[in-house]
Amino acid sequence: MELSSGAILAGTINDGIWISTDDGLSWELTDDSTLDLMTVRLAEGPDGTVYASTWGHGIYLSSDGGYTWGKIDLTLSDERINFVVFDPEGFAYTSSEHNGVFISKDNGENWERKYEYLGVKVKTLVFIDENNVFAGKWGSGISHSIAGGKEWDNVPVVSHGLDIHSIVKDSRGHFFMGTEFGGIWQKEDFDSDFISLGFESSDVEVLAVNDLDVLYAGTSGDGVYRSTDYGNTWTQINVGLGDDPWIWAFHFMENGEILLGVTGGVYHSDDNGDTWAYISLEGLTIRCIDENTMGILFAVAQDYGIYRSFDKGKTWELTSTTTFGHNFIRLAINDQDEIFAVSFGDGVFHSADNGNTWTQLNNGLFNTYVHRLVFDSEGALYACIWDGTEVNDKFVYNGGIYKLSDTEDTWNPVFTSLKNKWVTDLCFGSDGNIIVGTWSWKGWPIIDAPESGVFFSRDGGETWTQDTSIYLPSTVEKEIPKEIELLNYPNPFNPFTTIQYIIPVSATGDVNLRVYDIRGALVKTLVDQVTNPGTHSIVWDGTDKYGNKTSSGVYIYQLKVGEFTKSNKMILMR
């Protein structure tokens, strides 16, 4: 970025912040303290102070044109900073990935929470004037306020369905969908609509269901959730997983034992997920875990190969150096213990000897960006394809589903009406019913962009229909209830929970939303202002009115609007 002085600053990933005073012809490192920073944004304030937003190290300030830097003490549990921008009055705004938006009115010395309604993952703010503000949010579009941030509306944008990460089916034949920042959805059968089960602000990477129909959801940054009542209620179960766990894979074993693949290794639970303990493959991103009929476990470590374990996951060894360095993300094992693994960009690999040797199996594939492998009830193998081609700075979609031939090692395209979809998962029901999840990359200018979301077929894949009941609309209009409604999710939580409250038209006066401990002592006031009737939400980050982390336990949150009062309990589990 160019400063008002004419100097140019450049932020890098772990190589420091650099400055040029000759229009970029030569560069020098500004300060050794910036060498380990992943600098994502630079911004100059009205007084010439320069702010560096970093991913994982908070905000750094420079008051001498970028030559020396010092860190701001934000006292945030999450120092992944998205931006620093300035409003028309010159006040600084920032957003932490999991702590929401903050404002500073004293050049970065002190910060206070702002725009709680927006929640977390706010990626940018644009101020038209002091009252007219736009907010861009990861996975949930654009919000707009003409009341200085006191009220927000969704902005109509080009509509897309929800991006689907994972599809599972329970023993009743009910389908469950995990989506990218659209929550978890359930579909009872092909004649019913999808029903949202919550988690609207969560990126649900993987869903899994065990033999007892207990559902598990793995998220990016919020850890693991479990439901024992078919998805109606969920409990966060992160004991032992550390901060902001990113979950990729579940594998169920006997007697309530579970193996968990995370960014950082393999974890084990012997109590159905109540507690977790790290066991192996430290530092690796474990994208998939599966088991053959002989009890040998196989784990996919992204960029570091495919590993196997002969002792229920306690120790692991690399199957073959052939697999090292490939971007493996999934594997599938058939009843004959043949292993099929997908490398995103290198296609499908096959092993018939427990991973000792591997051969590529890409004959017939249009491209080698395979996302998932799925067996149908008869053991036929299907490959879900992602890809596209850049044409004149625009993106052309190519994808679809391929089936491995029964008689030769060749892939053939099937379900050709889906050939331009980025297919992320598919699930086979009964009587020829098939359900498919898709994804779209919304960050590119794209040619003939397909709708993402869910597609289903009742005739074995001959014809397909998009299921619009799992659609994320640009705006939502609901009749305002006549009574106060108050809830929070997730519950239990750690460390964030969203409190949603609905103010009826008949309610008048200031809105007060406060959190109390179990003894009745005030912990924090979350809302204290006049608010219009309708649905509102705010994120509580588990801190008290002084910004200190509160301890685990039961808390009461109480909403008062005029003569209306409502209270609920929530449980913080650190």
Image: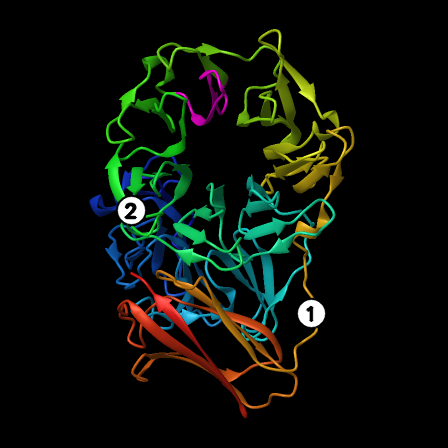
Residue tagged by mark 2?
Answer: 276
- The correct choice, above or below, for 368 with respect to 453 in the image is above
Three-letter code for the amino acid on which mark 2 is drawn: Trp
**Residue under the point 31% across and 33% down:** 284
Q: Please indicate, yes or no, whether residue 3 appears anywhere in the rendered image.
A: no
Q: Position of residue 35 (x, y in %)?
A: 25, 41
**Residue under the point 78% across and 32% down:** 463
Which region is colored magenta? 326-347
Q: Position of residue 72 (x, y in %)?
A: 27, 61
Query: Which quadrant would residue 85 be assigned to in this image?
Result: bottom left
Relative depth, front residue between 154 and 462: 462
Q: Residues within 10 Å of mark 1 (few under 14, many from 20)?
A: few
Q: CA distance from mark 2 to mark 1?
A: 41 Å
- The correct choice, above or below, for 89 with respect to 376 in the image is below
Count of marks overlaid on the render = 2
Q: Residues within 10 Å of mark 2 (few under 14, many from 20)?
A: many
Query: Which quadrant would residue 21 be assigned to in this image?
Result: top left
Three-letter code for the amino acid on which mark 1 is drawn: Lys
Outermost residue on the top side: it is 408
